[in-house]
Amino acid sequence: MEKQGRLKFVECPRDAMQGMSAFVPTELKIEYLNQLLRVGFDTLDFGSFVSPQAIPQMRDTKEVVQHLQLQEGTDLLAIVANLKGAQDACSFEQIRFMGYPFSISETFQLRNTNSTIEKSFELVKRMQNMAIDSEKEIVIYLSMAFGNPYGDEWNADKIALWMDRLASLGIHKFALSDTIGVSTPESIRYLFGFVLPRFPALEIGAHFHSLPDKWEEKLEAAYHAGCRRFDGALKAYGGCPMAKDELVGNMPMEKMLLHLKNKALMPDIHWEELQKALLICERVFSQAKLKH
């Protein structure tokens, strides 16, 4: 692996926990998140401001955020899906980023946010104004970026079109999201190779879901295509319940970090704190069973 550009890591305990069938106690969430903050990730995707009926696991996000011990160099990100969620996120000075799931699949956008793609774009416009007023940034998660199971139109030109429109609003951070775990090294190289040269001023990351034996090839493909921002979750917990294979989960953050370290690409993290986080991780995910 060649050295080129600083690597950034987004740890996603929110994505890992949100599909759990039993509620993780708020105190345990806070303990886990505070330990993750000590590791030194660039961003911690810690929670979401969404309907508790839709995602019961995240119903305590407002309480959780007030007990987080911020660390220099790590920013908090919360997922929002509507104006109410954005208003909630903007009310907390601690939160730096609002993540919005913007699907390239019309069907998935309707199912996920009860909105068409065009209406979602208009919503993002309003959210962007709120973000600017609150000194926050929006991160767009381009879900279904590598295909969808509905037969909806998919091509790289469509992705580039929406990236261009969203970037015109002043949004600079995007994540190509493999929502259902269908990306391959070939499709990863192709898509990053398509968008990175077209949008050199944007930060374009990778949010992959993967089978346990496929994470390494996906990481390698994205890195060699020029990606330098990677999402993951300790122990690969979480993922998408819509994936055909129940073994599909998040990219295993601790394995990605070790892999890059062994390639002489030293991630700027605190390894001892990572080991402590892994111990708490086992406690968190022994509390409940993941839905798939």
Image (spheres, grey):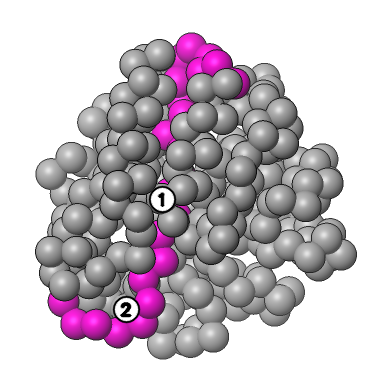
Say above or below: 65 vs 246.
Answer: below
Residue that sits furthest to the front in the current view: 272
Say above or below: 14 vs 70.
Answer: above
The answer to whether residue 121 is seen in the rendering is no
Range of residues picked out in magenta: 1-26
Front disc: 1 or 2: 1
> Is 170 situated left or right of 159 in this image?
right
Identify the residue shown where x is 73% and y is 62%.
136
> Magenta region's main secondary structure?
loop
Quadrant housing the C terminus:
top left
Whether the magenta-drawn stretch holds residue 226 is answered as no
Which disc number belongs to residue 235? none
3D distance between C-alphas at marks 1 and 2: 25 Å
Examine the image and state in which quarter residue 238 appears: top left
Say above or below: 213 vs 206.
Answer: above
Quadrant housing the N terminus:
bottom left
Q: Of 218 and 76, which appears nearest the observer? A: 76
Counting every numbered tag in the picture gives: 2
Q: Position of residue 16 (x, y in %)?
A: 42, 34
Examine the image and state in which quarter residue 6 appears: bottom left
Which disc number belongs to residue 226? 2
Identify the residue shown where x is 48% and y is 87%.
200
Q: Of 91 and 51, which appears nearest the observer? A: 91
Circle 1 packing at 10 Å, graded few (<14), some (14-19), many (20+), is many
Instruction: Identify residue for label 1.
Output: 39
Whether the magenta-drawn stretch holds residue 24 is answered as yes
Residue that sits furthest to the right in the current view: 133
Query: What amino acid is at disc 1?
Result: Val
Q: Position of residue 157 (x, y in %)?
A: 46, 75
Query: What amino acid is at disc 2?
Result: Gly
Label 2 SS: loop
Q: Position of residue 14 (x, y in %)?
A: 51, 37
